[in-house]
Image (tube, rainbow, N blue to C red):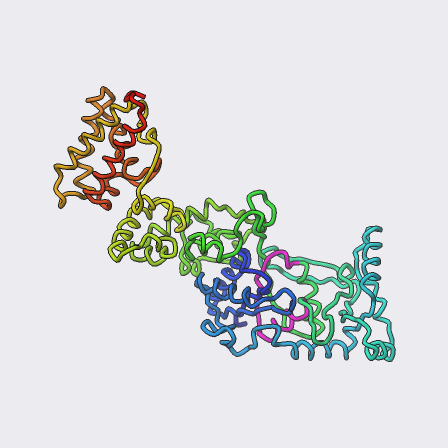
Amino acid sequence: MKVRVRLAPSPTGYLHMGTARVALFNYLFAKQNNGSFILRIEDTDKERSKKEYEEDIIKSLLWLGLKWNEGPDYNDYSNYIGDHGPYRQSERVSLYKKYLEILLNKGLAYYCFCLPEELEAQKNYLISIGKPPVYSGKCRELKKEEVLKKLEKGERHIIRLAVPKDKIIKFNDIVRGEIKINSSIIGDFSIAKGLEEPLYNFAVVVDDYEMEISHIIRGEDHISNTPKQIIIQQMLNFNKVYYAHLPLILAPDRTKLSKRHGAVSVMEFKKMGYLPESIINFLAFLGWNPGTDKEIYSLQELIKDFSLERIQKSGAIFNIKKLDFLNSYYIKQKSADELFDLSYEYIKDFIKQESDKDKIKKILEVYKTRINKLSDLPTEIDFFFKDINYPKDLLRWKDATDTEILLCIDKLEDTLDNIKEEDFNRDYLSQVLLKEAQEFAKIINRDEKDRGYMLWTLRVALTGKKFSAGPFEIMEILGKKETIRRLKKAGEIIQKNSNGNNDN
């Protein structure tokens, strides 16, 4: 059997990380088996389906690098690639109607005219006495003539499947093993609101058959739908398909991941500055592991090592710290040019002239080791582009007095004045200033190994921040003139705020 898998999202919301993981696992399985990955848009919910959601689904998958073999065209979403289209359910209504009529004509499905309030009362009663809330089958016994009269009158109706009673439906789930269910707890479930309004469980079975789907890989929340779909397959003499139900993605509190836990859509994570390769790597480990200590996986490596058999049954915890770790790793692998392009939306406000681009690339080379996501950049590097202000005590290392801080600044200015412009680079600066910092500690009667009395003050004077990259890298980017200017300003801050007492 040729492997053909599908992702079939409903465009009723933005692409959820859970759906993205389903897409990834389907994609990997198809690639491993020289098969086809199909994207099908299940837009039969006319009220909730929106084009903006559909476009988000397509753009998110393409951003992640999960290209499909069949489905909407990558460049023109209104067209299709593949021979099993159309790939939107809203354009396949005539096909569903054909199969609904087959079932109706064979007596395998029937029209139900029961009112919603009647069905609700029946359901509540069965639940109250501890029985499965299945339909009574009342309309199953209606005569053909009576059905036709009701239809002619335009009476409200749905179409139900005539489910065989007391039949064991079983299937072998690749993840969970054999699953059995008695058809008696399913009952005659609805498959359409009318001949041109199929419901999910019916439409999906027809589509999977017509698109020759071999394996259905989806979330475990669909397990309850599988027996229903198998019954429909059997009634229509469709080919058997294989199932693999993935564990749910859980929030840290072990509830199902939802918006109340924060961002959940792929594009939200993109906007926060996560890279597609880190999301792919992260999603792969939600419910799967390679059986080794290896944590970093490219998409190509996943294609090689992934297996459905190593998917776990228990829920997968969405650990944002793990995603941050992976994202920081992939950011570090990028060149300054790559990072400039990737982070442009976050840093564009700093670009006032052409020379700023080269400056930013130097900054990115330094700061790519200090950020977890690209959106961290503006607050991390803003001091390079603005006049900084900070409280004087931020300049203080441990028990340093105001007088000692001023002395430190004077010594730094004198030392830097004597360094040539061509030597103003991180290597030479560190060579000179590390010795100066040691000497300065001795001058103020502190442990000579504690270089913080000079280097802390220097770094804060340059950045105005408690945490930043090292001072030598920053000085090289700022240049000699700007470095000295910032040191002078630091001295002014100390003097201005000392209230006549330099030893505060």
Q: Who's the residue at 79% across and 56% down the image?
A: 132
**Is residue 447 positioned above or below 189 on the image?**
above
Q: Locate residue 498, reporting x and y percent.
A: 31, 25
Quadrant in the rendering for residue 117: bottom right
In the rendered image, the vertical position of residue 343 relative to residue 448, given as above or below: below
Question: In the rendered picture of this protein, how many numbered marks are placed on residues?
Answer: 0
Taking the image as shown, residue 473 lies to the left or right of residue 245, namely: left
Q: Locate residue 458 relative to residue 286 in the image: left or right.
A: left
- Near-viewer residue (106 or 380): 380
By secondary structure, the bulk of the magenta-drawn segment is best described as helix
Residue 51 image point, x, y percent:
56, 68
Q: Nearer the viewer, residue 272 or 252?
A: 272
Foreground residue among 228 and 488: 488
**Image quarter of residue 176:** bottom right
List x then y, in percent, for residue 311: 53, 54
In magenta segment, residue 447: no
Q: Is residue 174 above or below residue 379?
A: below
Question: Residue 359 versus residue 231: which sits nearer the camera?
Answer: 359
The reply to whether the magenta stretch includes residue 213 is: yes
Q: Which quarter shows the N terminus?
A: bottom right
Screen quadrant of the C terminus: top left
Q: Which residues are magenta?
A: 201-223
- The x, y position of residue 37, in whole percent, is 50, 68
- Is residue 168 left or right of 74 when viewed as pictured? right
